[in-house]
Amino acid sequence: MCVRDFLSAKAEARRLSMVTCYDYTFARLLSTSAVDAILVGDSAAMMVYGHRSTLPANVELMRLHTDAVARGAGHKFVIADMPFLSYRKGLAAALDAAQTLMSAGAHAVKLEGIDGHEDVVERLTQSGVPVMGHLGLQPQSVNVYGGFRVQGRTEAGASEIVRQARALEELGAFAVVLECIPADLAAEVTAALRIPTIGIGAGAGCDGQVLVLQDLLGLNIDFHPKFARSFLDGARSILGAVADFDHAVKAGTFPLAEESY
Ligand code: KIV
């Protein structure tokens, strides 16, 4: 997969799949899967570190996770999130942040929104850095919304999202994530763009879908957003395995002779 394949997938109406990943072990597993792309999301701040938002992620944290994922990802296309404010401190700082993530092994960066950092998107795309946009619910703006809320429900909100998506395409973005917007609006944005839309909580009318790996695997025992289907009861499987281990240790049946030196 490369940037051009995102565009041809859209042209050929092939749906794209993307999952988040934050570490080497899962990246190595995903490298043997059919998913089209791996996103080193700033959701690492929540999924790996237990923060309540993505705001504590910074460039150094994203560099470390991108580096680990890239080492396991094989030929998969790896996109790294530009963390909170890293692309709002001027062009030079944004380019430095993108350089750090690309040097760590990302093939593209993702950033939220567009208004006020059009110059960053344009300069990155003109400098060999493929850019994925992210519209709708922008988790880095959680404090503006007052919570993680569906966006684009009003007519004005919806046309803003359409405008921003067109602007991203115009500035050279190769794809755009649409998070938590009404399905009709996501379908409208998808129809308006030549670049693919990747939805999360945005209905079936997008060109592709992304899920947080922990949600997909059913590992998130505290939070079950409506849109996040668990394709595995991972929590039950893992707790079952841990219970089996605990039982075997306490019963003296682990380790066996053939498991010993
Ligand atoms: O950080 C992340 O996990 C994301 C996805 C929600 C698309 O940006």
Image (spheres, rainbow, N blue to C red):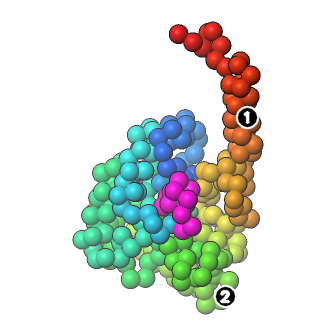
**Residue at 40% over, 40% down:** 71
Q: Quadrant of residue 236?
A: top right
Q: For residue 102, what is the image quadrant? A: bottom left
Q: What residue is shown with label 1?
A: 243
Disc 2: residue Cβ within 8 A of ligand 1's nearest atom: no
Q: Look at the image and say whether residue 6 sits in the magenta stretch.
A: no
Residue type beneath disc 1: Ala
Q: Quadrant of ligand 1?
A: bottom right
Checking the image for residue 154, the label placed there is 2
Give percent across and percent down for residue 18: 57, 53
* Secondary structure, magenta segment, majority class: loop
2 or 1: mark nearer the eye? 1
Q: Earlier in the sequence, mark 2 or mark 1?
A: 2
The residue under the point 70% across, 31% down is: 246
- Callout 2: few (<14), some (14-19), or many (20+) C-alpha neighbours within 10 Å? few
Task: Look at 44% across and 63% down and name the residue there.
Answer: 57
Picture residue at 68% right of the left edge, 25% below the top: 249
Is the residue 191 above or below the residue 217 in the image? below
Please report the bounds of the magenta region as a residue range: 41-53
Q: Can residue 12 be seen by looking at this rendering?
A: no
Indicate the position of residue 216 as horizontal and vertical percent values.
Answer: 67, 51
Q: CA distance from mark 2 to mark 1?
A: 49 Å
Query: SS at mark 1?
Result: helix
How many C-alpha atoms fall within 10 Å of the one at disc 1: few (<14), some, or many (≥20)? Answer: few
Q: Residue 18 got which mark?
A: none
Callouts 2 and 1 close, C-beta under 8 Å: no
